[in-house]
């Protein structure tokens, strides 16, 4: 999750150490001057978030144009992608610029609104990943029952409940006081396996983000900021990775985008496979006369 409004100045510990009294909104205020670290961290936030938003819109465009995504998986992925796009907009327009320029007169409402927007869409995206994972598990492990389980009605219900749950969770931050501390066809089955591998690949960066979030939230050294920086940037990197996974794992996307390297590689493999199959068939005809075991190659 985004660490609004904690990360914006990155120096709440310095603010607290300079006075024994905590002033409301002081954690949102910058120091009034910039350092190279502010510029590096702020630009990393801004660049990663911009890339994540751009790839997110690319995902929406690809899902609309390519038929293999016109199903329950595609609809769930659209909902997830919208969540990640919304979560990164505050990073582009608030967190990145504030971290770079360190302004001193930020109204607390600005940071609270940015935090609310980021957390709301992040919650929705995280929850929706669970539905996507369940969708892929059933498609791969029980393909005969997939169409009976993931109907249009169930898909719409999952999306509605997820957005409602995200709104309910974010509202609790304002209500509850916060404290610190049939066998499928081969092509269809291969597609489902790719989608399953795609979601599994995304979990790698998600686990890294989780580790840094735990370290940041439980760190007892108030003067160290690297955990907060890593937790923040790995979250955005995870969202970028989620969008890129759709592009990297699907040859239909490669062909649609004209990624010649992958397209040529795929065609070359197909030619080699056909040649090998033909050679195998010729060997089988000869081997029948010699009573040798027939070699079958698929």
Image: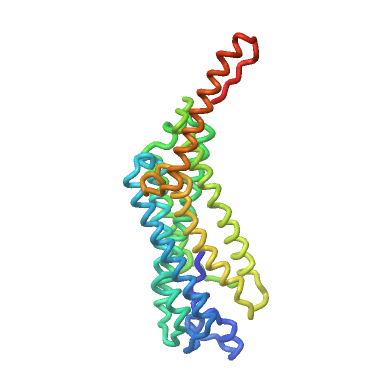
Q: Against 82, is 293 above or below? A: above
Q: Residue visible at 41% across and 57% down?
A: 55
Residue drawn at x 35%, y 41% is 70
Task: Estimate the x, y position of residue 52 in percent, counting from the top left.
Answer: 43, 61
The residue shown at (64%, 67%) is 215
Can the viewer see residue 157? Answer: no
Q: Nearer the viewer, residue 22 or 126?
A: 126
Q: Position of residue 177 (x, y in %)?
A: 52, 70
Residue drawn 49% across and 56% down?
241
Q: Pinpoint residue 38: horizontal percent, then vertical percent.
A: 51, 80
Residue 212, how many percent across, how many down?
Answer: 61, 65
Which color scheme did the rendering employ for the protein? rainbow
Instruction: Note whether 277 is above or below 77 in the view shown.
Output: above
Asked if 4 appears above or below 198 in the picture, the reply is: below
Residue 165 visible in the snapshot: yes
Q: Nearer the viewer, residue 256 or 83?
A: 256
């Amino acid at each position: 999750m985004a660490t609004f409004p904690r990360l914006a100045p990155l120096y709440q510990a310095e603010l607290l150490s300079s006075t024994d009294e905590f002033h409301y909104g002081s954690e949102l205020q910058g120091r009034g001057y910039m350092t190279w670290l502010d510029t590096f961290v702020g630009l990393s936030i801004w660049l990663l978030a911009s890339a994540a938003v751009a790839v997110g819109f690319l995902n929406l465009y690809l899902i609309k144009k390519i038929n293999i995504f016109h199903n329950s998986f595609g609809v769930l992925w659209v909902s997830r992608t919208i969540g990640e796009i919304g979560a990164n907009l505050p990073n582009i327009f608030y967190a990145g610029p504030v971290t770079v320029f360190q302004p001193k007169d930020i109204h607390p409402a600005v940071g609270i609104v940015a935090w609310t927007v980021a957390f709301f869409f992040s919650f929705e995206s995280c929850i929706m990943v669970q539905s996507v994972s369940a969708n892929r598990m059933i498609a791969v492990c029980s393909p005969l029952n997939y169409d009976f389980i993931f109907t249009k009605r169930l898909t719409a219900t999952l999306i509605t409940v997820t957005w409602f749950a995200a709104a309910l969770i974010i509202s609790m931050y304002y209500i509850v006081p916060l404290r610190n501390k049939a066998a499928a066809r081969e092509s269809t089955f291969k597609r489902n396996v790719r989608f399953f591998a795609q979601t599994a690949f995304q979990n790698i960066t998600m686990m890294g983000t989780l580790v840094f979030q735990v370290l940041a939230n439980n760190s007892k050294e108030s003067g160290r900021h690297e955990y907060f920086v890593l937790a923040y940037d790995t979250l955005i990197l995870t969202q970028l990775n989620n969008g890129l996974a759709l592009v990297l794992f699907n040859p239909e996307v490669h062909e649609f985008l004209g990624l010649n390297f992958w397209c040529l590689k795929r065609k070359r493999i197909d030619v080699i496979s056909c040649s090998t199959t033909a050679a195998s068939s010729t060997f089988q005809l000869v081997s029948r006369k010699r009573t040798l075991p027939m070699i079958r190659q698929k």
